[in-house]
Amino acid sequence: MGVKIRVASWNMYNDVWHSVREAAESRTATRFKSCSRLRFLSERFSCTPFDVMCLQEVSPLLISSLQKWCAHHNLTLVVPSQSTLTSSSNKCCVLFDKKFNLVAKKHFHLSEAVSTHLVGYAHQGESDIEEAFIKELRMRNSMATMLLLELPQVGTKILLTVCNCHIYWNPAYADVKLFHTFLIVKELFQFVRSSLESFPFVPLLLMGDFNSTPCLVGVAFSANLVLQTSSQHSQGSPADGQLSGVYELITTGRLSMKHPHHPAHLRKDEAFLKYGDLRIDPFQSAFREVKP
């Protein structure tokens, strides 16, 4: 008999219901926003006691209250280190029931991942467009929280990996969004393999705010939105039914260089041909395949 684990994901800052209400009530102080969101979180948890909760864009001012709330509800809270909690960073926190044991954790930093995986691709003077792409990617102060959890059971152990992420939002940088996602998934699998002596079947949950939809949407780009690329960023009209770059990569495990969101296609520069097709182990999407 399988074990059912209830998981939730919520962007605490960019929430339409709260934003409209706070604007109508002229609530601009951070403390009002924090109280409102913490109250909403309590209401949702009282209706459905989730086993794992992934929160994005958590205000540093809210973390202290969130710690007290977790202690009251017998939850463990994992947050990025205090040194990384800046006003411009995307803070991804994970709450989980204390019945889980925390086996390992990793805080993903996009700028560090770019230095590890991509800096070798760009060479001074070889391609200004490629250097601009890597610079744009490194500028995104974005993090993700990766956890390896163990649920002790009689006679066996159940392992679960959770990755809570927040993907860059701007559709004018579709290739940046794509590689942001690609690097997170790449390091997620490296994290699991390094945390276990062998690599048995471990369910992986990729959660968060992806700022992406399944279908590719045509976007016209202004020249002043793109660094050193002029009109080469225009992706034109998408084919009917074509998936967005982020969604296609995650759900199929592959993204061709010919896809409109691959930098080789989007930026029209031969320097990106060496990046090749992107490949990862695919995930099952909650957009199309919701299991009971």
Image: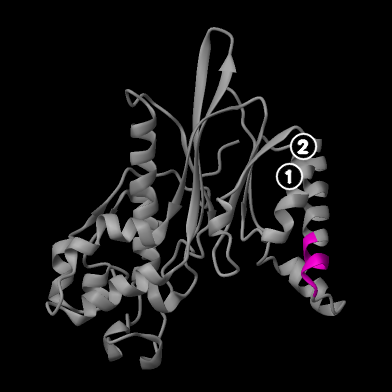
Look at the image and name its color scheme: one colour
In which quadrant is the N terminus drawn?
top right
Near mark 2 (Cα within 10 A), the count class, few <14, some 14-19 or many ≥20, is: few
Q: Looking at the picture, does residue 80 appear above or below residue 114?
A: above
Which residue is disc 2 drawn over? 71
Q: What type is the residue that disc 2 sits on? A: Ala
Q: Element at badge 1?
A: helix
Q: Dot 2 lies on which element?
A: helix
Region of the chain picked out in magenta, as a range = 29-34
Name the kind of residue labelled 1 in the image: Gln
Q: What's the mark number on residue 67?
A: 1
In the image, residue 82 above or below residue 121: above
Residue 2's label in the rendered image is none
Nearest to the observer: residue 212 or residue 42: 42
The quarter of the rendered structure image containing the C terminus is top right
Q: Are marks 1 and 2 in contact (CB under 8 Å)?
A: yes
The percent coordinates of residue 241 (x first, y second) are 39, 65
The image quadrant that residue 73 belongs to is top right
Magenta run includes residue 286:
no
In the image, farthest residue toward the top: 155
In this view, 217 is above or below 10: below
- Tell me what residue is drawn at x 75 percent, y 32 percent: 74
* Residue at the spot 29% in from the left edge and 70% down from the top edge: 134
Would you say 227 lies left or right of 44 here? left
- On the question of residue 61 being in view, the answer is yes
Most extreme residue toward the front is: 83
Residue 245 visible in this rendered orientation of the protein: no
Percent of width and height locating residue 212? 48, 64
Quarter of the image where one finds residue 124: bottom left
Rounded to the nearest whole Å, what is the CA distance between mark 1 and mark 2?
6 Å
